[in-house]
Amino acid sequence: MAALVSVNVGLPKDVAWQGRTVHTGVWKAPVDGPVMLRRLNLDGDGQGDLAGHGGEQRAVLVYQLDSYRHWRDVLGRDDLTPGAFGENFTVDGLPDDEVCIGDRFRVGDALVEVTQPRVTCYRVGLRLGEPRLPALLVAHHRPGFYLRVLADGEVRAGDELVKVADGPERVTVAEIDALLYLPGHDRAAVVRALRVGALSPGWKASLRALLDEPADRPGNPGLGAVAPPPAWAGFRPLVVTGVHPETADVTSLRLAAPDGTPLPPPVAGQFLTVQLAAGLVRSYSLSGPPAGASYRISVKLEPGGAGGRFLRDHVRAGMTLDTAAPRGAFTLDRSDRPVLLVSAGIGATPLLAMLHDLAGHRSGRAVWWLHGARDGAGHVFAAEVRALLAALPSGREVVCYSRPRPQDRPGVDYTRAGHLDAGVLGGLDLPPAAVAYVCGPPGFMDDVTAALTAAGVAEVHREQFSALAAQTPGVRPAAAGPPRSRPGPGPTVTFARSGVTAGWSDGDGSVLALAEDCRVPVRWSCRTGVCHTCETGLLSGDVDSVPEPLDPPAAGTVLICCARPRTDLVLDL
């Protein structure tokens, strides 16, 4: 019989960490006497980051005395007291390799159900001053688990946890934790786990993603999008075979192998990264047919943009550009579902490649081309898009001009005056079963994504040309300037999306820490090679990993929280 040894609560607070301030609820302390357990948490308890912790599926975190004893020996710690691992219930019994997802327990007056393992993040390591802990919890098969509250009630230390129902399929907490975070990802075990109704929606989505990708493709699609492996490592020279103005501020380049041999076909939606000059590295979406003999990229000449200015002033047919292989996970799926291709301005480029692919295969899918431009002068690829849609039996086009010129013809050049926005999308009777691909300015993508979701479209994919927004859970925003380059005695690390090159120093610890020092927007959660949130495209160079990730990243990528440069690096960051 399992026993509730300690009930621990704590409200979020700000704590100092590595020169920053973290808002976290990981500090828990025992409570004497009865405590009311409600649907979302215990009275007096709270979570600092509801994106990763808390909520109905993660109302109560459980950790076991046996694991306390384990870590006392492994870490050489004698200061571990109830609540030290951020748990609400410290229990005697209920080991992770015996408790199953869907098990139900009566504790005090409450009824609870096991929903998922602990989410591994850096804050449990922060609490104990042991940065390795997120990885150790997974590697040692001792994550702990969350409970959902089925019936409110008072609980107190000393209560027994009485099992009242077994979870179906008997999938243990340790088993499902390893299934997601450790190598292997046995597909039969994933199918079995997905049959457990009590499993939290987030974990179900991760496990479904494991099934959706080819089993032999490196990487962990359950933790992040996995792109096809790059066709070549590093950069290779490609020759510019053509320079074609599309509009006054958009120019297309065609690139081919210098010896005329066919280039490896990209997947529709991917991008190329080119070294335009020393320290000037830029990525541009492929806009041409994936099956073509050459690659086409289309570039908007932004005012003040160094890449566009270089292309305008220096790039001519016959010159050679060092180019990385096509990359990216923003790619057209191969289902028969309707497709929504939604763009604004130069955001049309990756979607145009998808449209080429659909037309080239004479796809019978319903295809919607939804595009926003300022006016006819800025309506890039207009004739090309219409010719491609005409080759599709179920192609439709809606084009909005925000400021049409007098010579722009409604019903001919454009469909509606005004912005492509929620009002337009909401009136189109879009098929909910569609898969949507969205590209354009960040504000446009946010608005369109919300509108598509409101219209019932469940699957929306987005592509962003610039650096992605930072994801630093719990860290209070601090005043900072734009990304900055920095000298260093070691290999150079170029952050291509941010336009920054920095020199490595041994004191940096990891590429992630170097990026933070250079104010490059970064995304992370565990900082120990478990969660794959920091997985980043490695365009060229070699790294050592310290520590080694528990599950290797996808081909052509690196976990920057573990990476240290062995040579000069170029990263898609």
Image (tube, rainbow, N blue to C red):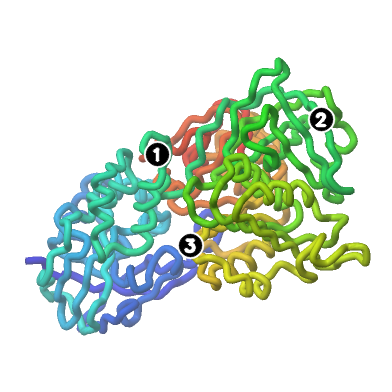
Badge 3 amino acid: Ala
Residue 288 placement (x, y as % from top left): 69, 39
Q: Which numbered tag is attached to residue 433?
A: 3
Q: Quadrant of residue 358?
A: top right
**Residue corresponding to mark 2:** 242
**Residue 382 shows in this picture:** yes
Distance from disc 1 to disc 2, alpha carbons, whole Å, reads 36 Å
Q: Tell me the element at label 3.
A: loop
396 on left or right of 88: right
Q: Residue furthest left?
A: 1
Question: Toward the viewer: 111 or 383?
Answer: 383
Q: Please say if 135 is above or below 17.
A: above
- Circle 2/circle 3 CB separation < 8 Å: no
State which mark lies toward you, 3 or 1.
3
Earlier-in-chain disc, 2 versus 3: 2
**Residue corresponding to mark 1:** 214
Q: Which numbered tag is attached to residue 440?
A: none
- Categorize mark 2 by other alpha carbons within 10 Å: few (<14), some (14-19), many (20+): some
Residue ID at (13%, 71%): 161
68 on left or right of 40: left
Residue ID at (36%, 63%): 201
